[in-house]
Amino acid sequence: MRRPAVAWLRLALVALLLLLPGTAAAGASAAGGAGDVLEQPGVLVDPAVPPPPVLQAAGWLVADLGSGEVLAASGARTPLAPASTLKLLTALALSPGHDDAEPYTASDGPGAADGSKVGIVAGSQYRYTDLLHALLMASGNDAAVAMAEIAGGTEAATALMNQVAADLGASDTHAVNTSGLDADGQTSSARDLALLAAPVLDDARLAQVVVTPQYAFPGAGEGFGRRRATFMIGNHNRLLGSYEGTLGLKNGYTDAARGSLVAAAERDGRRLVAVVVRAEGSEADQCAALLDWAFALPASAEPVTTLEASVRSASEPAAAEPSDRAAGAQGDDPAAAAPDAAADPDAAADGGGPPGWLVVLLVVVAALVAAVVYLRLTRDARLARMRQRRAAAARDR
């Protein structure tokens, strides 16, 4: 054998040995592996599709509300302060069993609430539908306090909220108050806020409230006749009226939590939800960019996982995903990067590496190189034997 040929063969064999374990690892990743895919660091997305927009949010996610398929995510399981997006859970947990016309006479509590308020006046009467519109449209913290009072107080109200969160599988969520104002131990995540979107939109009353642009809220007084003065409150969701197909849902902001938004939209019968948490800049623009990207995806795009699989992984951490889904890391969001990745090399390795299709391609190329080298070596050996026989025959003559 000639030395260059031997060198090529060795190189091909080494490449095969190095790449084959990578192929096995890529297959395990596609099958889901243990735990929740959404807990992996970096931007999770099908590597075969265009990258999603770069966002300034510590946690974000875009998913199909019909199928539950998560199309892209980053930091989606990071527990963060939810600000007023938590009011979606307040409405889901506290509104059942209360008629729109149910009256409430305000105590001093709502007026003492911090932050945004609609102007509930102690001693004045309001209907439950007034409180719901104030809560979800104008993010009234005074309405949140009023609804907690109707439920039996903050402790009883948050117990109901936490039970609903647990029933939905929103395991990153813990409510301490009904308003979403910053409080020790009060958290949610982009994944959990996405889980709240579908049941809110499935509730006809709440779905109507979150898309109402303006509402005539009662002024101070009693009774609900035409003679009672009202004033207009507006919906704080900036996507209403500016983004095609918007279905709501809820924005939030505090100095500590920064911006958050749960936004849903429908086009051609397809409903998507985009969530950003702890966002800098315009959360509305970032959700709009996510929705635009997701609506433009080809039908062949593979989801990262499903919301159902993510929830199931909490109780079955070793279970595999139900289908062969690609979950690749494409780029890094500095705000969403796991802080312990550098300190834990194994954890960092789990979230990176080349995509599966590239590994398979490299293996095929290496195999072809090995085959060509093998054929060349066997040809050279055959020719050498033929020359030796001819030389021996010439000597015998």
Image (cartoon, rainbow, N blue to C red):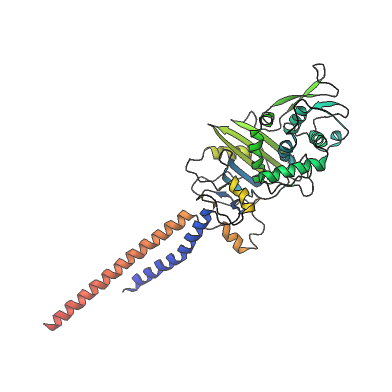
Vertically, is 96 above or below 305?
Answer: above
In depth, the one of 161 and 345 nearer the eye is 161
Q: Is residue 56 visible?
A: no
What percent of the width, then of the height, locates residue 374?
A: 32, 67
Q: Name above or below for residue 75 compared with residue 115.
A: below
Relative to 87, 195 lies left or right = left
Establish if 365 lies above or below 124: below
Can you name the residue that lies furthest to the front here? 97
What is the quadrant of the C terminus in the image?
A: bottom left
Of all residues, the one furthest to the bottom in this rendering is: 396
Question: How many numbered marks does the figure carry?
Answer: 0
Left/right of residue 359 with respect to residue 308 in the rendered view: left
Q: Is residue 387 visible?
A: yes
Q: Image quadrant of residue 149? A: top right
Q: Could you say which quadrant of the image residue 386 lies in?
A: bottom left
Q: Who's the residue at 23% across and 72% down the image?
A: 383
Instruction: Report whether 382 appears left or right of 220.
Output: left
In the displayed structure, 303 sits above or below 319; it is: above
Residue 250 at what x, y percent from top left? 69, 36
Q: Nearer the viewer, residue 206 or 72?
A: 206
Which quadrant of the figure has residue 219?
top right
The N terminus appears in which quarter of the rendering?
A: bottom left
**Which of the pair 340/123 is nearer the observer?**
123
Q: Position of residue 179 (x, y in %)?
A: 77, 39
